[in-house]
């Protein structure tokens, strides 16, 4: 309908619209219906009027025909008059044939006038009625009726008015009814408005009311509205719940994370959260009503917050109950719905720790810079006083203290009542340098780190200092920083001060180390004697002096004999003690102008800068050397034991034996070797011949290096005689060197060189292999194969895998291990007894025998030797040599044999050269002998005859 009618023409309300449309429809229908009705009525009325007029004129004609005939025109007139009564005619006339007209007018009737147009319309539709009055075929005249159109129109119009009035009334009643019903039906819809009001008023649970007789559509619509409202209520309820929940969580989160307070428009606190209370230390009741500015003034140069409509951000600081606090503050104005400022929300984040951390970082960086700078100075600076001054300054600066000082411990040792002296100072304490302070006990005990030490009390009183922090600078003293405001120093302060103190300590240590290094560069730390370098300088000086003055100077090279044995047996501690004692004896022997030095190891030297007399071999030098030899030959007392070491001394004289310190020392060394070769415990002046010997030794060394690969080594075998059975009980393999020029060289000339150069290891391995090979050859020749003893050197015993090496060689050669015996010296065993026991036990476990060689020349402790898995011991030939005449040797030999037997060891006497010795040893119950009396060492080939004889003896 709204498409058909412009909506602007329609009323806004539904009722109005329905009413308007209904009215319009009714008007159209009524208008159309009544129009058609009137038209029909009009036409029918015209027709009926026309017909009635015809009938009437017929009746009238019949009634008047007789009268006409008779000329009774009164009757005619009456008849016509009757006919006009209540007729639609205006007039009736009888016109006789002569044209006379009898006209009767219809009486006037008052009627409501009809519109002229209707009269005109009716007049146009009706035609006048004429009837000829004839009687008996003769026409007497014409009866004519004239219609009264106005009258007819008035009648019709009255009808129209009447029906229209009725229709209008009916229409009005219909409209009124409809309006009432519509209003009633739409009243339900109208209630939606009150529902809306309810909702608007917050009564969200209200429902739109339903009218009992409400039309179905409206009922459905209201139900739909109620359903939608219910659904919306549920949805909004959930949404509101969710929002409420979310809001609560946000609030809780904010309350957890931030310090929140609400402030009224005047800047007074009207609410605080728990965190506010906790952080500030102020209870809610205390905070409420107070100015927000009481809880935070801008930390920097920012203007303080003032109530305004803008957001304020900034850092604030205030003194909380638990200390100074720093918060980052955001103040947000809150407006009501109308845009009026309602209050402020103030959110603070506690940045105290962060600020403190930042401050600590900056502070720390400053301190690190100070420490780094001081460290750099400490490295570069040699002047400790300047460094001390810088350290005191740095301590004061880094700690923000007005003064600091370094106190030096001026009393050594642990004596009670130490003294501390102000060594350097910064600030007020810079005037107290040199001041002596009494200090009972440890300078770092007696007061808390942040307080004042008792010993500092006088200075504190003097300068009004109330607190301090100090740190020990090693054994040197104490570094302290002091304030006059009673400030408490914290751990970081202590760490910083310790850092400064450590730098000082390190610098002091470094300088001491430097001094010590300088000293060590010139002196021997063990004996405190000048070292080789210092000796060289002294000797150079002496040479220069002697050269200038034209006199002689000399240097002695002193080597302790058998020092290595002491070292090996009693350990390096004992060796060191021996060296210290020896050094003391040397100094005691030397004259004041002599310089006694230690060259290293067991080597010493004495510089004699001034030699009197013409002789090169100065009696004074000889006399000093003799004194030294004698002094060092005296027993040393170490670890409760009496030990004997002797000395071999070589003397070289300037200018004859060398023109430089190096040459002279070398000559003295050569002479010392000469003394050693002369049987040790003696001295020797340098000579060209000695030099020759030393040169020979060097030459031998290089030749020995090639001897093994050139196959220049060979073995001789010296038999051993079993005294009880009188048979050959075995051989000892003895190394020989077939020198291309010198012929057969005995081992004493080269074994020590082999040992010194380490060549003894491959050569020793070769000896074991060669003995195995020889045993195999003798066995292959069908000879009775005797056991063969092999000498092991100390260097070989130092090989941890010696037993495995021997096993490999013996197993490789396929020799019975029981045919092998190894000879070791006592001193070898004592170098590292634990390792020796382990190695020897493994060798023993392989089935080989072990014996101790040269017994009696070393430590001769049978009890000690019990620890080793030994089978036999060989009495050194020095004890056998003077048998039977020397009662001491006889007694020693007898005792050794008895003791050895008591330990189940066999005894072999070495160096038996005559029958007397043999008989004596027989009496002592000696088991076996070895010596030239039985046989000299023989080449392997010569042994065959011996073995054959033995075989024959066995056969006999
Ligand atoms: N005056 C005298 N001397 C006698 C008599 N009977 C034997 N001798 C000598 O005494 C030495 C015995 O060997 P040693 O005590 O083990 O002493 C040996 C041993 O310590 C060492 N030596 C020899 N061969 C080897 C070897 O293969 N390896 C190692 N490491 N040392 C060896 O060389 C040292 C000397 O060996 P040699 O010169 O062969 O000297 C041998 C031998 O010729 C005698 O009645 N009177």
Image (spheres, rainbow, N blue to C red):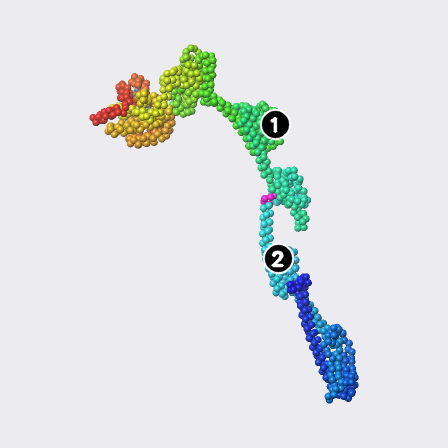
**Residue extending furthest top?**
614
Of helix, strand and loop, which one carries label 2?
loop
Q: Where is residue 440 in the image (x, y as percent from the top left)?
A: 55, 26
Look at the magenta stretch and give its main secondary structure.
helix
For the magenta stretch, what is the residue range?
A: 255-259
Q: Residue 327 carries which label?
A: none
Q: Position of residue 799 (x, y in %)?
A: 36, 29
Which image quarter: residue 49? Answer: bottom right
Mark 2 crowdedness (10 Å alpha carbons): few <14, some 14-19, many ≥20:
few
Ligand 1 sits in quadrant: top left
- Report how far apart the C-alphas of labels 1 and 2 lie in the structure: 83 Å
Q: How many labels does the image show?
A: 2
Of residues 756 and 399, the one nearer the viewer is: 756
The residue at the point 60 percent across, 45 percent down is 255
Which residue is disc 2 drawn over? 205
Of residues 865 and 211, the one nearer the viewer is: 211
Q: Residue 427 carries which label?
A: 1
Can residue 175 be seen at all in this image of the molecule? yes
- Is residue 440 placed above or below 123 in the rendered structure? above
Q: Where is residue 369 in the image (x, y as percent from the top left)?
A: 57, 31
The residue at the point 66 percent across, 58 percent down is 197
- Is residue 200 placed above or below 349 in the rendered structure? below
Of circles 1 and 2, the one toward us is 1
Instruction: Answer whether residue 258 is magenta in the image.
Output: yes
Q: Quadrant of the C terminus?
A: top left
The answer to whether 876 appears left or right of 111 in the picture is left
Which image quarter: residue 600? Answer: top left
Can residue 826 be seen at all in this image of the molecule? no
Q: Position of residue 678 (x, y in %)?
A: 36, 17
- Is residue 105 placed above or below 388 in the rendered structure? below
């Amino acid at each position: 309908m709204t498409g058909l009618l412009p909506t602007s023409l329609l009323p806004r309300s539904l009722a109005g619209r329905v009413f308007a449309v209904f009215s319009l429809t009714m008007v159209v229908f009524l208008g159309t219906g009544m129009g058609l009705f009137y038209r029909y009525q009009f036409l029918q009325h015209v027709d009926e009027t026309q017909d009635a007029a015809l009938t009437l004129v017929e009746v009238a004609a019949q009634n008047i025909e007789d009268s006409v005939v008779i000329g009774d025109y009164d009757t005619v007139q009456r008849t016509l008059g009757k006919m006009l009564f209540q007729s639609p005619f205006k007039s009736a006339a009888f016109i006789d044939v002569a044209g006379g007209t009898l006209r009767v007018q219809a009486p006037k009737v008052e009627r409501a006038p009809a519109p002229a147009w209707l009269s005109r319309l009716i007049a146009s539709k009706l035609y006048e009625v004429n009837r000829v009055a004839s009687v008996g075929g003769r026409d007497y005249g014409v009866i004519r009726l004239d219609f009264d159109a106005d009258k007819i129109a008035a009648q019709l119009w009255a009808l129209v008015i009447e029906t229209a009035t009725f229709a209008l009334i009916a229409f009005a009643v219909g409209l009124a009814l409809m309006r009432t019903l519509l209003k009633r039906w739409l009243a339900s819809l109208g209630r939606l408005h009150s529902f809306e009001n309810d909702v608007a008023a917050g009564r969200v649970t209200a429902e739109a009311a339903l009218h009992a007789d409400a039309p179905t559509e409206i009922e459905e619509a209201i139900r739909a509205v109620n359903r939608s409202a219910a659904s919306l209520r549920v949805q909004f309820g959930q949404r509101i719940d969710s929002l409420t929940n979310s809001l609560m969580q946000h609030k809780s989160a904010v309350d957890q994370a931030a310090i929140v307070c609400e402030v009224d428009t005047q800047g007074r606190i009207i609410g605080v959260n728990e965190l506010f209370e906790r952080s500030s230390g102020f209870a809610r009741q205390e905070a409420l009503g107070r100015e927000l500015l009481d809880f935070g003034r801008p930390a920097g140069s920012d203007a303080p917050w003032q109530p305004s409509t803008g957001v304020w951000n900034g850092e604030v600081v205030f003194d909380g109950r638990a200390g100074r606090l720093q918060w980052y503050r955001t103040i947000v104005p809150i407006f009501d719905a109308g845009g009026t400022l309602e209050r402020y929300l103030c959110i603070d984040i506690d940045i105290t720790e962060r600020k403190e951390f930042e401050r600590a970082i900056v502070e720390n960086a400053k301190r690190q810079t100070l420490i780094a700078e001081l460290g750099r100075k400490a490295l570069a600076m040699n002047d400790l006083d300047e460094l001390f001054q810088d350290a005191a300054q740095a301590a004061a600066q880094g700690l923000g203290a007005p003064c600091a000082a370094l106190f030096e411990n001026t009393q050594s040792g642990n004596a009670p009542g130490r003294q501390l002296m102000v060594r350097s100072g910064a600030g007020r304490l810079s005037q107290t340098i040199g001041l002596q302070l009494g200090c009972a006990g440890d300078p770092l005990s007696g007061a808390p780190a942040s307080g004042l030490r008792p010993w500092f009390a006088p200075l504190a009183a003097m300068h009004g200092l109330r607190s301090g922090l100090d740190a020990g600078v090693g054994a040197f003293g104490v570094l302290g920083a002091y304030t006059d405001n009673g400030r408490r120093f914290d751990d970081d302060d202590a760490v910083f001060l310790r850092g400064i103190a450590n730098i000082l300590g390190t610098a002091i240590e470094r300088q001491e180390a430097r001094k010590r290094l300088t000293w060590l560069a010139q002196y021997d730390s063990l004996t405190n004697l000048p070292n080789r370098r210092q000796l060289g300088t002294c000797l150079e000086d002496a040479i220069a002096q002697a050269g200038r003055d034209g006199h002689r100077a000399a240097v002695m090279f002193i080597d302790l004999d058998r020092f290595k044995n002491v070292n090996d047996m009693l350990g390096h501690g004992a060796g060191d003690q021996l060296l210290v004692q020896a050094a003391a004896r040397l100094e005691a022997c030397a004259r004041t102008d002599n310089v006694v030095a230690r060259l290293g190891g067991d080597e010493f030297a004495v510089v004699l800068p001034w030699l009197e007399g013409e002789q090169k071999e100065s009696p004074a030098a000889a006399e000093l050397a003799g004194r030294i030899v004698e002094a060092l030959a005296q027993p040393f007392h170490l670890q409760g034991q009496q030990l004997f070491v002797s000395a071999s001394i070589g003397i070289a004289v300037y200018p004859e034996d060398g023109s430089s310190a190096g040459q002279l020392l070398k000559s003295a060394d050569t002479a010392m070797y000469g003394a050693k070769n002369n049987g040790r415990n003696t001295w020797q002046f340098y000579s060209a011949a000695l030099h020759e010997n030393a040169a020979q030794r060097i030459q031998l060394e290089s030749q020995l290096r090639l001897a093994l690969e050139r196959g220049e080594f060979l073995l001789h075998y010296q038999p051993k005689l079993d005294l009880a059975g009188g048979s050959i009980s075995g051989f000892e393999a003895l190394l020989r060197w077939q020198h291309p020029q010198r012929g057969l060289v005995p081992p004493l000339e080269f074994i020590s060189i082999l040992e010194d150069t380490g060549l003894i290891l491959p050569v020793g391995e070769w000896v074991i292999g060669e003995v195995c090979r020889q045993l195999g050859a003798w066995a292959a020749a069908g000879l009775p194969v005797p056991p063969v003893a092999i000498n092991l050197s100390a260097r070989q015993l130092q090989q941890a895998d010696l037993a495995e090496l021997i096993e490999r060689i013996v197993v490789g050669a396929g020799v019975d291990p029981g045919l092998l015996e190894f000879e070791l010296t006592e001193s070898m065993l004592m170098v590292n007894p634990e390792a020796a026991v382990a190695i020897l036990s493994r060798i023993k476990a392989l089935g080989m025998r072990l014996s101790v060689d040269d017994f009696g020349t070393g430590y001769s402790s049978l009890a000690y030797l019990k620890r080793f898995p030994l089978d036999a011991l060989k009495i050194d030939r020095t004890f056998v040599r003077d048998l039977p005449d020397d009662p001491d040797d006889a007694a020693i030999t007898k005792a050794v044999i008895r003791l050895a037997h008591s330990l189940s060891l066999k005894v072999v006497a070495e160096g038996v050269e005559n029958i007397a010795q043999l008989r004596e040893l027989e009496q002592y119950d000696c088991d076996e002998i070895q010596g030239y009396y039985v046989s000299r060492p023989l080449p392997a080939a010569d042994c065959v005859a011996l073995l054959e004889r033995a075989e024959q003896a066995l056969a006999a």
